[in-house]
Image (tube, helix red, strand yellow):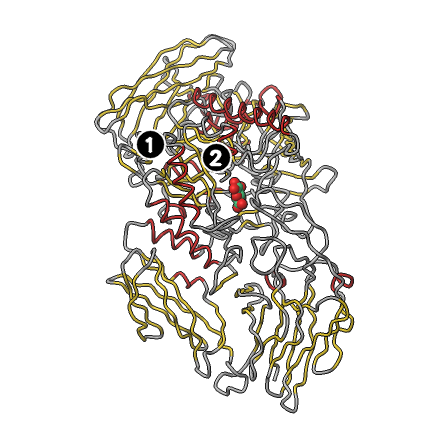
Amino acid sequence: MLKAKSLLLLFIAAATGLTSFAQDAGRKTISLNDQWEFNKENGPVEKVTIPHTWNDKDVLDDAAGYYRGMGIYKRKLKLDETAKGKNIFLIFNGVAQEAEVLVNGKSAAKHIGSYTHFIVPISPYLNYKDDVIEVRANNRFNEDIPPLTADFTFFGGLYRNVTLLITNPVHFSQKENGSNGIFITTPQVSASTASVQVKSSIDNASAVNKKVQVITTIFDAKGNTISNQTTAVNINKGGNMVVIQDIKSVQKPQLWSPENPYLYRVVTKIIDPKTKSVIDQVSNPLGFRWFKFDAEKGFFLNDKAVKIIGASRHQDYENRGNATPDALQIRDIELLKAMGGNFLRVAHYPQDPQILEACDRLGILASVEIPVVNTITESEAFTNNCLNMQTEMIKQNFNHPSIIIWAYMNEILLRLKFSNDKPRQQIYFDHVRQLAQKLDSLTRKQDPSRYTLLVNHGAWDIYNKVGLTKIPMIVGWNLYSGWYSGVPEDFGKFLDRHHKELPNTPFMVTEYGADADPRIRSFSPIRFDKSVEYGIKFNQVYLNAMLSRPFVAGGEAWNLADFNSETREETMPHINNKGLLTIGREPKDTYFLYQAYLLGKPYLKITSAQWKDRTGTADSAALTSTQPVQVATNQKSAELFVNGKSLGVKDAVDHIMDWQVPFVNGKNQLRVVSGDQSDQADINFQLQPFKFNDANIPFKNINILLGSKRFYIDEKEHQLWMPDQPYKAGAWGWIGGDPYKGTNNRITYGSDKNILGTDNDPVFQTQQVGIKQFKFDVPDGEYELALYFAELVGGETKEALAYNLDNNHKKEVEEQRIFDVSINGTAFLPKLNLAADFGYTTAVKKTTRITVQNGKGISIDFNAIEGKPVLNAVQLRKIY
Ligand code: GCB
């Protein structure tokens, strides 16, 4: 046996270039992430490392769509002769979305679906000399594979880890839907005693019958053996055997919970009874916990009421698409934990194995779901793919103590198909219900120890009518009152309605959220302005409503982090900004609000510290500009000091305290104190003079957004933009006109269209329509002036996106718009026709230098030739 062991070491060394290995467990695994060559079909070949996607860049550009087609990955595999006689597998954690694996040009396996993993046995195809693996991945639209449409991007690629697994001919089965062949349950658990059942599926790929022992050992977190069971079995050549081991009476088990995520380790070995050597070995996590959803009282873990509060998570990351490395995946769960969350909705699809391992480790409860989103195809192939994905998801993730729920559908009736043909629509509804029923039954059968969940959007009537609220054990509602429709306060009414009309069905709020673009701030936050401040208000209302109703099992914020959704436009095109973290995982103010609500220990945080570069106009002739500052806390009250001076003590309302702070030009030191808690932040303030002739505040530059109540921070060019004002003598402002309001009913001002040719969309998305004049009463000198324009009306009308619930676009009335712009009486942009000269929704910036003399200041005049003149933004900089 010793000989066999060293041989195994030898050929892996050859395969990888490594020379030392961890303890021999009969099997070996080694990452195959490096040294791949990649090309798009007919495209040039490049060297890549896994994780890799071919869509990291094209999902961010202005051109609609992204490459959805074939990508080919190739890699050499160096195995020497000594590997012969072993069983060799490739483990793919995720390939989007159809995959074919070829070894030396021969097809070894195919797999459907981007989000579950699969294992390919490759021994029969190897030559052990110069083997080549090829993966042909395709992310084209396929009507038989979910997801069909969704508010996220269907990145293509070999985007999760690839591993080589080498086993002996007798090994834990790799044929069980991508699982590791071992399924652990805890048929009975209490604080005093627990039982464990371990089911191991074992393959004997050798040509002889084998007598082996299966030994399962449970270790506690310190590594002490707490139980050991040995089963002797005979496995026929070429056969499979399922070994069931019942481990009774584990005394006083340490329970797993968010506060104490105590993990045991179950090590299952196949042993040669003669030599006692290990033929194969697999480890799995084990947590002892029991749980219950109650329609009246909410959720219980280990008999303790626990309010579920957490977030959903998408797997993509800033500029990387879905090819997110392990460390960043794990960090997401650490950030959720640090926020005080106790639940992760792994949405809308199964994610990297690292995620659930982190949930197990950190004490985050979880649900996982397959990507059946928005709509289905009524084909047998679609149904089978759904059922297969569900099976893969359950089997692959079966042993995670963190998982308490399996889910299978999200907002499936979002856009009603066949609305003009009721009989046909009924057939579709029947199909949807039948598919839900099949998925639910399959799930209950495959795992009776967990709950099933089906997730709806807030259209109460239709989900009840179609019967979808009757199928799952728990109903999920995605609710956006105060975002896509209505006001935040409607949210509580919906919760009460469920409780009243479905009193026996437990439910969770599986989604709620408001977009908060981290670059946008407002003192008058309003629905759809995308300001961080609106996000705070919205989340306060939602958290209060859920926390005060025991029958609500819990809620998951949509979303932990901003994520890519290629079809989205709005202030940050292609990004959904409902994250509590940015897409680069920087906390937004809302993340701090959650900490204030959820963390048990004393908490005090100047949330506005995130807005560390500010601008604003001086209050009258004073040398300060007064603006609000928010502090998130779980303390009753606190005192704020600015540059050492107290601004008084304030009480927290819904975990937020507000102060009006008189900011001085330059650095402002904020310090908040409550008992022995304190926090501080430096805010750099650019003070704009109340009047330009105010000698105390020298004028440098000013950036003004027209038709807007927002502040906008252009982080790339370090420009601070502020809202406009009507003209004030001695200062600046517009004369004439009104703010532009788009045809989208939800928007109070501005447009939600992608502005082409810029990343600073909010600078161009608002405008003053019918403007007559813009004046700066600046002193004599040299200035640079830039005028920003974009034609917001007209152009390609896009179909309203499916996720935009209640999206009532009025028809746009296009008008011919031609106007002259002159500066101090001199023609600057004669006969400007934005649409004709530059195209619709296209960023236009026109810059000039001006000599101001004779105390006349700057006057920009707009003269209508046809239609109404517009101005989107203006920028003035003093040169000398
Ligand atoms: C939803 C969807 C989710 C979207 C979200 C949104 O209801 O389930 O996929 O991303 O709304 O932000 O619109």
- For label 2, the residue is 455
Could you say which disc has been placed on residue 822 in the image? none
Between marks 2 and 1, how big is the CA–CA gap?
18 Å
Is ligand 1 within 8 Å of the beta carbon of the residue shown at mark 2? yes
Task: Tell which of 575 and 725 is nearer to you.
Answer: 725
Residue drawn at point x = 34 percent, y = 16 percent: 245
**Number of numbered markers:** 2
Residue 278 place in picture, x, y as percent: 39, 21
Q: In which quarter of the image is residue 786?
A: bottom right
Residue 61 place in picture, x, y as percent: 66, 52
Quick check: can you spot residue 166? no
Residue 743 place in picture, x, y as percent: 63, 55
State the SS at label 2: strand
Tell me the kind of residue under disc 1.
Asp
Is ligand 1 within 8 Å of the beta carbon of the residue shown at mark 1? no
State the SS at label 1: strand
**Relative to 187, does residue 578 appear above or below in the rendering?**
below
Instruction: Please state if 377 lies on the left or on the right of 833 as rendered.
Output: left
- For label 1, the residue is 294
